[in-house]
Image (tube, helix red, strand yellow):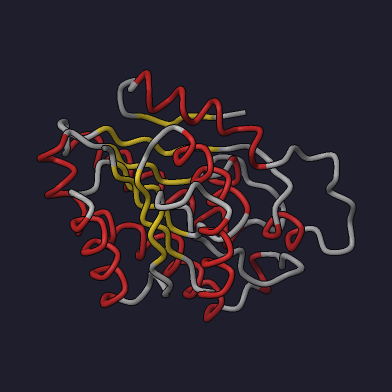
Amino acid sequence: MSVAIITGASRGLGLALATGLADAGWNLVLTARGAQALDEAVRLLPAGSAVAVPGDVTDAWHREAVLTAADELGGVDLLVNNAGILGPSPLPPVADLPIDALRAVYEVNVLAPLALAQAALPTLRARGGALVNISSDAAVVPYEGWGGYGSGKAALDLLSGVLAVEEPGVRVWWVDPGDLRTRMHQEAYPGEDISDRPEPASVVPAFLKLLGDRPASGRVRLA
């Protein structure tokens, strides 16, 4: 049975993808910072389909624990780097962007996904697996206020592209799910009504189709 690791899996897009994969018969290793929320998420999934490994993806010991849990299930076939942070809310202009806040965004949104991918690559190579790095249109469009988050996603996109060239035996997709009704998206627009955005579950069929079709590595938009 195939094994997937999903980071940031306690809510939003991560939980939606976990639900779709569990329903499709995957075994899952799920991680997020909040242990209680992660346990609650696992209880929503089919019994026995998911293992919860709470912790922070910026911690090397936690990444090791996540990979160990996947190895105990047979080895990772799919890594979904979904965990991320927005940075300051409301979103500040670049001129006022605190450097410490930007550093934190890069630690979570760029360096941690790369570190986890590096750790997973030997198994992904051996199993012909896939790496999914969750991106954003803010990585390619210079939206006002999105300099911190967008530049981090742009860096992740470029790293994904280079990995795709360097790792021909692994599918590498950097995936833009579109604007969704998530807590992070609400934080980007505090006080605004974002109920017109689709629920994260709306992109799950496109995500499962991506895994089934296994197109060449590249940038993918789900919605």
Camera-nearest residue between 144 and 201: 201
In the rendered picture of this protein, how many numbered marks are placed on residues? 0
Left or right position of 189 against 21: right
Task: Name the foreground residue: 59 vs 219.
Answer: 59
How far across and how far down the image is residue 195, in percent? 85, 45
The picture places residue 72, in percent across and down from the top left corner, at: 19, 58
The quadrant in which the N terminus is found is top left
Q: Indicate the position of residue 158 as horizontal and vertical percent values.
A: 36, 44
Task: State the residue at coordinates (47%, 48%).
Answer: 154
Q: Position of residue 79 (x, y in %)?
A: 33, 47
Which quadrant holds residue 200? top right
Q: Is residue 38 left or right of residue 128?
A: right
Q: Residue at x 53, y 51 (%)?
A: 14
Q: Quadrant of the C terminus?
A: top right
Task: Judge from the rendering whether residue 72 lies leftward or rightward of residue 42; answer left or right.
Answer: left
Residue 139's place in the image compared with 83, above or below, is above
Q: Quadrant of residue 212?
A: top left
State the residue lying farthest toward the front: 47
Q: Residue at x 14, y 47 (%)?
A: 123
Q: Is residue 28 left or right of residue 44?
A: left
Please, is residue 190 above or below residue 59 in the view?
A: above
